[in-house]
Image: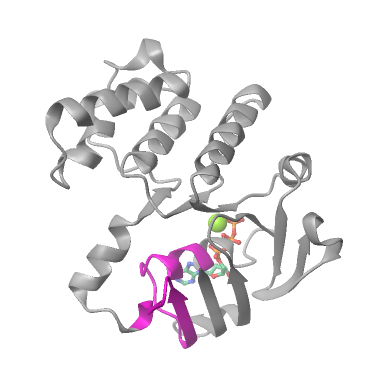
Amino acid sequence: MIQLFHVSKIYPPNTAALKDINLQIAKGELVFLAGPSGAGKTTLLKLLFREEEPSRGQIIIHGKDVTKLNSRGVARLRQQIGLVFQEFKFLPHMTALDNVALAALVTGVPRQESYTKAYQLLRELGLREKYDAKPPALSGGEQQRVAIARALMNDPMVVLADEPTGNLDANLADETMRLFREIRQRGTTIIIASHDLDLSQRYGTRVISLQEGYLVDDLSPLKEGRAG
Ligand SMILES: Nc1ncnc2c1ncn2[C@@H]1O[C@H](COP(=O)(O)OP(=O)(O)OP(=O)(O)O)[C@@H](O)[C@H]1O
Ligand SMILES: [Mg+2]
């Protein structure tokens, strides 16, 4: 469960990126964060993994107030969160497979197990031919899929994705959404910031809309229209 109480974020000196956001997301929900450029979508995601801290308000993730975590707590929080962001931060001299496997290796998962899983995820994401390619030699969409595979390596409780289908054609976007839905079946909470409202409508998920930092709409098709 993720809860936000009266959360505001002001970037110095005076950009109010989020204004008094109240929000609850249950475990295993798949949520779209919608809204125009500059609405605060990325900022909201960044608050959830403590890349940024709120200026006001409280953020509770699985019972813990993330604004009160020490550095060890922050590290633990981030281990439970899979990130799919625009800046992929790959190691450019390692192969796609190595980059994905590394996510598990660094947490102490044995080599064989890490690589088996990395293979499997890359294959599911249609990158069978690209295991050995280095990230700079991959297209934007391919890099995005490597990033998704990496985010899923440690079976995170929460996946935060910022425009994960932005560089993908319609087929791959569908494929990606199918994968997200599969992960969701295991109880993982997934929050996707996206301009692609078509995608969210097609998948019939809850859509939280931001505008100029305000939460202006929270629509859940499962609950007959309006919720929250
Ligand atoms: N590090 C920062 N320092 C100062 N202002 C920032 C910073 N990051 C974002 N902002 C500002 O905060 C507001 C919200 O930005 P944010 O990146 O959250 O929007 P967004 O909804 O993700 O937009 P987009 O759809 O373009 O990605 C914008 O006005 C932006 O200029
Ligand atoms: Mg953004």
Residue 165, picture quadrant: top right
Who's the residue at 22% across and 36% down the image?
A: 91
**Does residue 92 appear anywhere in the picture?**
no
Who's the residue at 50% across and 28% down the image?
A: 141
Q: Position of residue 58 (x, y in %)?
A: 47, 85
Residue bounds of the magenta highlight? 44-67
Q: In this view, does 157 lie to the left or right of 164?
A: left
Rendered-image quadrant of the C terminus = bottom right
Name the one closer to the observer, 199 or 42: 199
Residue situated furthest right in the rendering: 224
- Colour logic: one colour
Name the one closer to the observer, 122 or 194: 122
Let me know if residue 59 is in the magenta part.
yes
Q: Position of residue 106 (x, y in %)?
A: 15, 44
Q: In this view, does 9 lie above or below 87?
A: below
Q: Where is residue 32 in the image (x, y as percent from the top left)?
A: 65, 54
**Does residue 16 appear anywhere in the picture?**
yes
Residue situated furthest top in the rendering: 129
Let me know if residue 12 is in the magenta part.
no
Who's the residue at 75% across and 47% down the image?
A: 197
Residue 21, picture quadrant: bottom right
Query: How many labels sit on residues?
Result: 0
